[in-house]
Image (cartoon, helix red, strand yellow):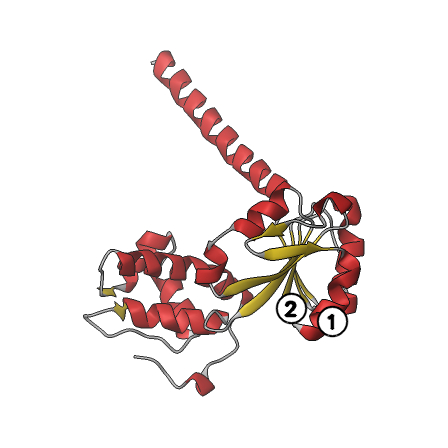
Amino acid sequence: MTADPALRREIPDATVARLPEYLRTLSRLAEDGVLSVSSEELAAEVGVRSAQLRKDLSHLGSYGVRGVGYDVETLALEISRALGLTEDWPVAIVGMGNLGHALASYSGFVTKGFRIVGLYDDDPALADERIVGVPIRPLAELTAHHAVDPIAIGVIATPAPAAQAVCDALVGAGISSILNFAPAVLSVPSGVDVRRVDLSTELQILAFHAQRKSLAAGDLRSAVVAQ
C-alpha cells in the first residue's frame, strides 16, 4: 500500500542514492514477468539488507502488503515518481570528444526520462556534425538556446582544464543541475547541484578490492603449503 504523497518526509540523500538500483532491479523483474516481490527477495537482488530496503521505501510511503510483498510495477512507478523520472528532463552535453559522443548516442536516456536537447563544443571541425539529430553548437550559443528551449541538466564531458569555465557558462545561463565527468573539483554558487562521476577514482577503488582479494588468496595458499 502507498501513503498519501503529501505525507512523505524529505528523502535522505543516502536513500536517494540507492533508489536507482531498486528501480533498475524492479524493471528487470517486470521484464521477466514477475508481478510481486518480497522485501527479502528484492534486497537480495540489490545487495542490501532487507531492513535497509524497507526503511528506504518507507520514505516513499510504500510499505508493501504482509504475506504478498510489493507489487513490482506499482513500486517501480513510485520510485520513478520520487526520482522525477515521470517527467521529461532536457539535457545538454558540453564537450563532444569520445565520451561526449558516447553519452549523446546512448539510447537509454530516452527510456529513463531524459532528452538530449543540446550538444556543445568549440571545435570548428564539429560545427556541422549532428548526433541523434541534435546539432553540435559552440558554447557561446548556450545562453540563447536555454532561453528558448530550457535545459534542466548540464553534463560536462570536457578535459579537466576546461571544466570550471564550462561550469561557469552553465551556471551563468541559469542551469543549476550539473553532472561532471571531468576529473576536476568545481566551484559553484549556493543553489547549484553538482554530481561528479570520476571514472579513475572508481577504477582505483576496484583496484584496492582486487588487491585485497589477491592478498587473501596468497595468504590462503601459504597456509595450505605450510600444512
Position of residue 78 in the picture relative to residue 126 (left or right):
left
If you read the primary sequence from the N terminus, does the residue marked by circle 2 or circle 1 appear first? 2
Report how far apart the C-alphas of labels 2 and 1 lie in the structure: 9 Å
In which quadrant will I find the C terminus? top left
Q: Tell me residue 200's x, y (percent).
A: 62, 39
Residue 210 against residue 192 in the figure, above or below: above
Residue 190 in which image quadrant: bottom right
Give 101 or 48, whichever is nearer the viewer: 101
User: What amino acid is at disc 1?
Assistant: Gly
> What is the number of the mark on residue 35?
none
- The residue under label 2 is 151
- Tell me if residue 150 can be seen: yes
Q: Residue at point 59% right, 36% down?
A: 204
Q: Tell me residue 198's x, y (percent).
A: 63, 46
Residue 168 in which image quadrant: bottom right
Q: Residue at point 62% right, 41% down?
A: 98
Q: Residue at point 46% right, 81% down?
A: 8
Q: Badge 1: few (under 14), some or many (20 or more) residues near its Cα, within 10 Å?
A: some
Going by the picture, which residue comes out furthest to the left?
Answer: 67
User: What amino acid is at disc 2?
Assistant: Ile
Element on which disc 2 rests:
loop
Give 161 or 95, whichever is nearer the viewer: 95
Residue 217 in which image quadrant: top left
Element on which disc 1 rests:
loop
Position of residue 5 in the picture relative to residue 160 (left or right):
left
Q: Nearer the viewer, mark 2 or mark 1?
A: 2
Give 170 or 56, whichever is nearer the viewer: 170
Q: Badge 2: few (under 14), some or many (20 or more) residues near its Cα, within 10 Å?
A: many
- The residue under label 1 is 174
